[in-house]
Amino acid sequence: MDVIDHEQEKTLYELKEFLTSVISNAPYGIVAFDLEGEVTMTNALAVEYLGQKMSVNRFVGKNILELIEGMPLLAGTVETHIDRGRKPFDLPSVQINKQFMSIKGRLISNGTMLMIEDITAQKKAEAELQRANTRLRELDSLKSMFIASMSHELRTPLNSIIGFTGIIIQGLSGDINNEQRKQLKIVKSSAAHLLSLINDVIDVSKIESGKVELSIGRFDLPALLDEVKSTFTPDAEQKGIRLSLETPGGLSIRSDERRAKQVIMNLVSNAVKFTDSGKVEIKAARGDGVVAVSVRDTGIGMRREDLKRLFKAFSRIRVKGMPIKEGTGLGLHLSRKIAELLGGGIRAESSLGKGSEFTFTLPFEYKGEA
Amino acid sequence: MKRILVVEDNEKNMYLMRYILKSAGYGVIEAGSGEEGVELAIKEKPDLVIMDIQLPGIDGLEATRRIRESEAGGKIPIIAVTSYAMAGDRDRILKGGCTGYIEKPIDPETFLSEIEKHLPSGG
């Protein structure tokens, strides 16, 4: 043994104190053992984590394998580590009594160090999250079922309301005066409006659950546009705005006619709704593999920042000095989703006070799910 | 007088259609289920059938198939009445032997003209 002088002894003592202090205060359980498995250094957390009730000092000097005897996974790993070539190892989750520990083995000079971390709280949070997730999935399918069955129940009485007010308006069940006719027409159009809102809600829930069934077939786009125009001509005339249509002839499309019509109806309906003077122009133009149907109006328009929110579900754009128009804020959201389902898209341009232009692009041939 | 068979399980809808059709001078035969509808279509040989698709027991599609299979039913126009929720089923309905379809809710202003498009003229 080399002789060391007093100064060196003091330095060594200070070094040991320093090391002990670092290890004692580490936020992990630490156990160092030598090549034979004899514990050379540890801290109180490690003693506690390994389920022992002895002091740190008594822990030192014992064989690590004896201390972890009761933990097969850890014991097996450490035994292999000592006997068959020392390599770093990670045990992400070891159960000790009722706690969960993450244990890492790392090589140090003349031995191995175990770093033990209590991950019980983390494990519990994970399990909690998993339960919450399962519950969320259950709720989501419950929501879809609820919407599907409620919407059916909500629609059935509307069939009677719309049907019978229609009969009375037509005078089928006896004469009515003009005031009564006017009032019943309001009843009927309100019921029809309510019905279209319910249908929008059903559509959104179907699209969100990926349950939309397309009905693909060939149809003549100009004929469809003409139908849409006729539908809105009375509304436009009543408001004193001009509704025009410009389309090349013979535009045969293979897509879902009803869905395409739904999108165009929505765009024209919006244009008429938000225009109080001037005109609404519907135009179709051929593009590369697609047809672009644009609806341009001279209505109230909107600000650039509103354009960004325009297609979000339930978003309503407010324009100063304008009363809020009736609606759910689902129309454009739905239209864009449908346009995308059909392989196309919708874009919008607008400036406040000058009007808006919406362009719906639709492929000539539906190509199937993208 | 032309006779129309209405297959519909909902009382109020039945009353509505009966009212419109009778007001327009048609004879109305009523069936409250798909089975009854098939039976009456074969026995009564109506000029047209209005068929609700969502029915208890055999649905409107199955009833249509059975009417088409029977000798008498070969050429009767069958107009399906569908609800909005079944929009994706239109192809199935037309391929299933229906001549046309009307979507609920029934609008008395257009209902007759929709039906009459499919009624053989004359008689």
Image (spheres, coloured by chain):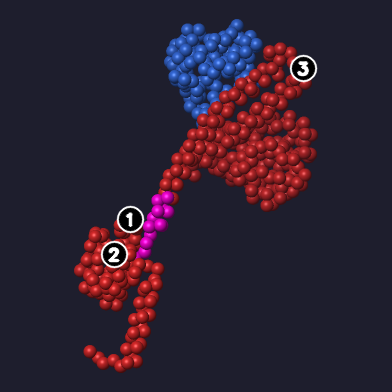
Q: Nearer the viewer, residue B69 or A117?
A: A117
The numbered mark 1 sits on a residue in which chain? A
For disc 1, the neighbor class at 10 Å (few under 14, some 14 to 19, many from 20) is few
Q: Is residue A23 left or right of residue A186?
A: left
Q: Alpha carbon of mark 1 to alpha carbon of mark 2: how far? A: 14 Å
For disc 3, the neighbor class at 10 Å (few under 14, some 14 to 19, many from 20) is few
- Asked whether A118 falls inside the magenta stretch, the response is yes
Secondary element at tag 2 = loop
Tell me the quarter of the image containing the N terminus of chain B: top right
* Disc number for residue A177: 3
Tell me the quarter of the image containing the C terminus of chain B: top right
Query: Do we see residue A71 in this rendering?
Result: yes
Magenta region, residue range: A115-128
Q: Which of A12 and A248 is in front in this view?
A: A12
* Disc number for residue A98: 1
Q: Are marks 3 and 1 in contact (CB under 8 Å)?
A: no
Query: At which x and y percent is residue A12?
Result: 33, 86
Type of the residue with mark 2: Gln
- Asked whether A321 falls inside the magenta stretch, the response is no
Instruction: Choose top left, top right, bottom left or bottom right for residue B18.
Output: top right
Which badge, 1 or 2, is on the more N-terminal residue?
2
Which badge, 3 or 2, is on the more N-terminal residue?
2
* Disc number for residue A52: 2
Tags 3 and 1 both on a single chain? yes
Query: At which x and y percent is residue A303?
Result: 71, 50
Q: Alpha carbon of mark 3 to alpha carbon of mark 2: how far? A: 95 Å
The chain coloured red is: A
The numbered mark 3 sits on a residue in which chain? A
